[in-house]
Amino acid sequence: MAVISYKNVELHRKDLIALKHVNLEIDEGEFVYLIGRVGSGKSSLLKSIYADIPIAAGDARVLDYDLNTIRRKEIPYLRREIGIVFQDFQLLTDRSAYANLRFVLEATGWKDKIAIEERIEQVLKCVGMLNKSYKNPHELSGGEQQRIVIARALLNHPRIILADEPTGNLDPATGEAIVKQLHAISSQGTTVIMATHNLSLVEQFPARVITCENRTIV
């Protein structure tokens, strides 16, 4: 079943065409690489999926939402079903990894303290970081921070994970471990879209590849 369906979509950034003639179907549980040069539209495409950039033309559906007609008050509900993994981590530096995760759950409406603790434990176990949860981000390596970011993306049981250059700031071995982790998450039924420059990772862990070039996707 398609969780993302774009038909002849056009996206603009600052009044310029970022991407046009985008036709794309991505299914539940699929792993997809998004490749292309800097400025080729990869980030624009990812941002359009979580309704950060409006659809300028064409038809676009993500999960049960029509992005052409989505109302502002519906956007937080869409985003709750999408986990985002950033290249630069974007963790709150003044609190522990555990407190970073608790903050997200409380901000998205979780109230039950025991349920919060259980969910945090589950996602930390999933990324192998249960024993480091008391540390602040600056006490963790880049790879460990990225694992916490993946745990954060998993908190609300998302149906889609968008990973924007998740290995960009990591050494090769750590990058491989992160991609392996994302493939494992996809194999459990979550759709994963990973933007990357690193073609050796794409060769090492094969999956469907979508390329952004000449302001469209191939």
Image (tube, grey):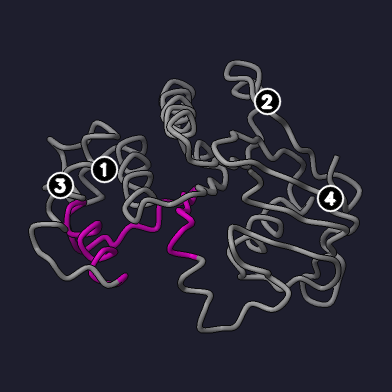
Looking at the rendered image, the disc whose residue lies closer to the viewer, 4 or 3, is 4
Q: Give the residue displayed 38% in from the left and 44% down from the top.
A: 150
- The CA distance from mark 4 to mark 1 is 34 Å
- The CA distance from mark 2 to mark 4 is 23 Å
Tag 3: residue type?
Lys
Tag 1: residue type?
Val
Tag 2: residue type?
Leu
Looking at the picture, tell me which residue is in the foreground, 192 or 86.
Answer: 192
Residue 94 x/y as whole percent? 21, 64
- The CA distance from mark 4 to mark 3 is 44 Å
Q: Which residue is mark 3?
A: 135
Q: Which residue is mark 1?
A: 123
Marks 1 and 3: in contact by CB < 8 Å? Answer: no
Task: Look at the image and tell me in which quarter the C terminus lies.
Answer: top right
| Mark positioned earlier in the residue sequence (4 or 3) | 4
Looking at the rendered image, the disc whose residue lies closer to the viewer, 3 or 1, is 1
Q: Give, as a single range, the part of the protein colored magenta.
A: 79-108
| Mark positioned earlier in the residue sequence (3 or 1) | 1
Residue 209 x/y as whole percent? 72, 31
The local crowd at label 2, few if under 14, some if 14 to 19, many if 20 or more residues have their Cα within 10 Å, is: few
- The CA distance from mark 3 to mark 1 is 16 Å
Residue 153 x/y as whole percent? 39, 51
- Any magenta on residue 186? no
Looking at the rendered image, the disc whose residue lies closer to the viewer, 2 or 4, is 4
Looking at the picture, tell me which residue is in the foreground, 78 or 54.
Answer: 78
The local crowd at label 4, few if under 14, some if 14 to 19, many if 20 or more residues have their Cα within 10 Å, is: some
| Mark positioned earlier in the residue sequence (2 or 4) | 4
Q: Give the residue displayed 29% in from the left and 34% down from the top.
A: 127
Q: Which mark is residue 199?
A: 2
